[in-house]
Image: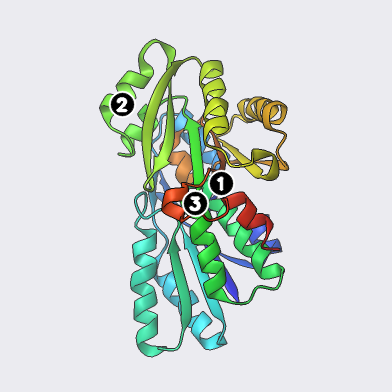
Amino acid sequence: MRIFADSASDLPKSFFEDNDVTLFPLRVLIDDQEYDDIMTIDSKEVYQAIRDGKQPKTSQVSPELFLRKWKELASSGESGIYIAFSSVLSGTYDTAIMTGDQAKETNPNMNLIIIDSRCASLGYGLLVKEAVRLRDAGEDDVRTIERKIRYMAAHMEHLFTVQDLDYMARGGRVSKTSAFIGGLLNIKPLLHVEGGKLVPIEKHRGRKKVLRRMTELMAERGDQLAEQTIAICHSDDEGIALELKAIIEEQFHPKSIEIQMIGSVIGAHVGPGTVGVFFLNKVNLQSEGGSSSPTDCLKNLG
């Protein structure tokens, strides 16, 4: 079985190479020069360009690359699963569907599942890592992996704060009004992902207060945090990521904490100084029919 993911998962290049995961790079445009995220540009270059007053632009995965990889999958006879960046934030998922349908016209037996993760950055990356874990544990039924990943995606919390909302307003990710409010009096916005979209939920004065509030929300929303792998991302601000890590370790004692830098594509929209945390939230027993929690579900898969 083949696993596909794109660069908005913010996993390092070595992860794709070491775990036999096919990478679909989104693209970054700076000074009329186009780059493939992860492959031909480093995110630090993007952050430096932003600090220099430039406005990097981004675009989705090349349709030609999708079509080529789908045809290779069909020729191999293997099944495949592509976990995609949130369709609300990028057209990549829609392009994957379009090219997948095109490939199936000449390869009707191609077994490809495409999932709209409705997640971003390491929230998305944790889904990819779980798919790899399932495959490597011997799970070869692509439908079973699909079901587990969709369940996990539905319970993936994203909490993050940005240094300057103006970066996101430029890319249309938040309104200019929200950006203006966030810039007043050192007020830092707290955002989450809702329905695959970035949504500001609170405002706090100063970074320390917003970090404390992030961990309060983790305590309210998190499911058995001591049993989880927590992910932290940052945009060229490792110090704030380590500060958040220390708070989380002291309060929740999770199984592990992973830190990665936000990649070029997402970084081009959030700008330097962003920090985010990702974890599984609690089950709504009414909507889930009384099923076990996300963490219990994942613990019982191996």
What type is the residue that disc 1 sits on? Leu
Q: Amino acid at mark 3?
A: Ala
Nearest the viewer among 215 and 263 is: 215
- Residue drawn at x 52%, y 29% is 217
Horizontal side of residue 87 vs 266, given as left or right: left
* Snapshot quadrant of residue 255: top right
Place of residue 269 in the rendered image (x, y in percent of width and height, measured from the top left): 41, 39
State the scheme by which the image is colored.
Answer: rainbow
Disc 1: which residue: 122
**x and y percentages locating residue 243 in the rendered image:** 66, 24
The mark nearer the N terminus, 2 or 1, is: 1
Q: Point out residue 79 in the picture as x, y percentages from the top left corner.
A: 54, 79
Badge 1: few (under 14), some or many (20 or more) residues near its Cα, within 10 Å? many
Structural crowding at the residue carrying mark 2, measured as other residues with C-alpha within 10 Å and reported as few (<14), some (14–19) or many (≥20):
some
Residue assigned mark 3: 8
Disc with the residue nearer the chain's start (3 vs 1) = 3
Report the Cα–Cα distance between label 2 and label 3.
Answer: 24 Å
Whether residue 141 sits left or right of residue 137 in the image: it is left
Give the Cα separation between the discs numbered 3 and 1. 8 Å
Q: Is residue 290 visible?
A: yes
Mark earlier in primary sequence (2, 3): 3
**Residue at coordinates 41% horizontally, 52% vertically from top-left?**
287
In the rendered image, which residue does mark 2 sit on? 178
Residue toward you, 98 or 217? 217
